[in-house]
Amino acid sequence: MLRILSGIQPSGTLHIGNYFGMMKPAIELQERGAAFYFIADYHSMTSLTDAAERRANTLGVALDFLACGLDPKKAVFWRQSDIPEVCELMWILGTLTPMGLLERAHSYKDKTAKGLSPNFGLFSYPVLMAADILLFDSNLVPVGRDQKQHVEMTRDIAIKFNLTYGETFVIPEPSIKAEVATVPGLDGQKMSKSYGNTIELFGEEKAVKKKIMSIVMDSRTPAEPKPDADQNLAVQLLKLVAPAGVALEYENRLRAGGLGYGDLKKALFEHYWTGFAAARARRAELAANLDYVESVLKDGAERARAIASGVVGRARQASGLK
Ligand code: ADP
Ligand code: TRP
């Protein structure tokens, strides 16, 4: 059976780029195979050093995933640090990972360019990610485009291990949905919590409305026809949050002339707000029932650990550790 695995760091509040790029495709894939999803709290240590914030974010990600439709009967869902075997496998894989491979990582280069201090954890981030993936014999890894290189590194490391010690690991493939590979943020760049250009998945009504209404557009008058309407940021976001056909209708109205940007942005907010209304209500219910959320993660960790210990045992055996 196809094994699908992905993780998300609890390094902040999730935004609709995370949702459309990774969470939604991952949740859809739980119908297509054995799905394994986890909260990458070890990874978050490379950028966040506030314990209380990590705890709060971890709970937030758990609520987000469950509210958005992750079904614990179909998918195994856990906290990365509940399975410390991943750190052992990271060491084993690290001994076969060339420095040059890690030095080429875009994510490492971007993060250090943005001022994150280049510690060993940040540098070795892709090796921990390789361990996450290989520890579960994963076939498919649903992620946004920015994580593609990390999955390719995982493949390289797994191939090297298999050549060195004999066939041990399954070689995974990234799964990237072209139409949501890079969701744009409020400024038109990739939406990312580190660029301060996000629309939160479960943001507060007034705050999100304010953000959406302040998206900067050009100075053409409402009456002017806009032949480049498909490039409009609000239209692109509307395509994601509104039912099929709605964005096209707005695109056509812009193209024809007569639609003001204020009305377009209002429509974007309304569709965002109603589109996530059911999930928002589920999230509030879950937040009032934290024992249930904790029990899902605990049960997930037990199921995941049973698999992980078998795979790490295979790697130990192959490499002569026992
Ligand atoms: P951020 O850039 O906000 O820090 P992360 O790096 O934590 O987000 O990404 C978590 C997941 O969401 C990854 O699978 C990533 O590829 C996906 N993702 C993040 N931002 C976007 C985006 N703007 N468009 C599509 N996918 C995204
Ligand atoms: N690096 C991923 C991100 O920032 C999170 C992650 C950690 C992950 N381990 C993973 C994603 C394994 C997929 C598979 O989004």
Image (spheres, helix red, strand yellow):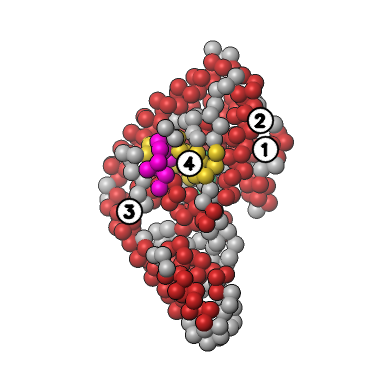
**Above or below, comparing residue 174 to residue 250 in the picture:** above
Between tags 3 and 2, which lies in front? Answer: 2
Q: Mark 4 or mark 1, which is nearer the start of the sequence?
A: 4
C-alpha separation, residue under disc 3 versus residue under disc 1: 38 Å
Q: Is residue 136 left or right of residue 187?
A: left
Q: Report the residue marked by disc 1.
A: 102
State the residue at coordinates (45%, 69%).
247
Q: Report the residue marked by disc 3.
A: 283
Q: Is residue 318 left or right of residue 61?
A: right
Tell me where residue 211 appears, x and y as whole percent. 48, 69
Q: Mark 4 or mark 3, which is nearer the start of the sequence?
A: 4
At mark 3, the secondary structure is: helix
* Residues drawn in magenta: 28-38
Q: Report the residue marked by disc 2.
A: 97
State the residue at coordinates (50%, 23%).
312
Residue flagged by tag 4: what amino acid is it?
Ser
Residue flagged by tag 2: what amino acid is it?
Thr
Q: Quadrant of residue 218?
A: bottom right
At mark 1, the secondary structure is: helix
Sort mark 2 into few (<14), some (14-19) or many (20+) by Cα contacts within 10 Å.
many
Residue flagged by tag 3: what amino acid is it?
Arg
Q: Report the residue marked by disc 4.
A: 6
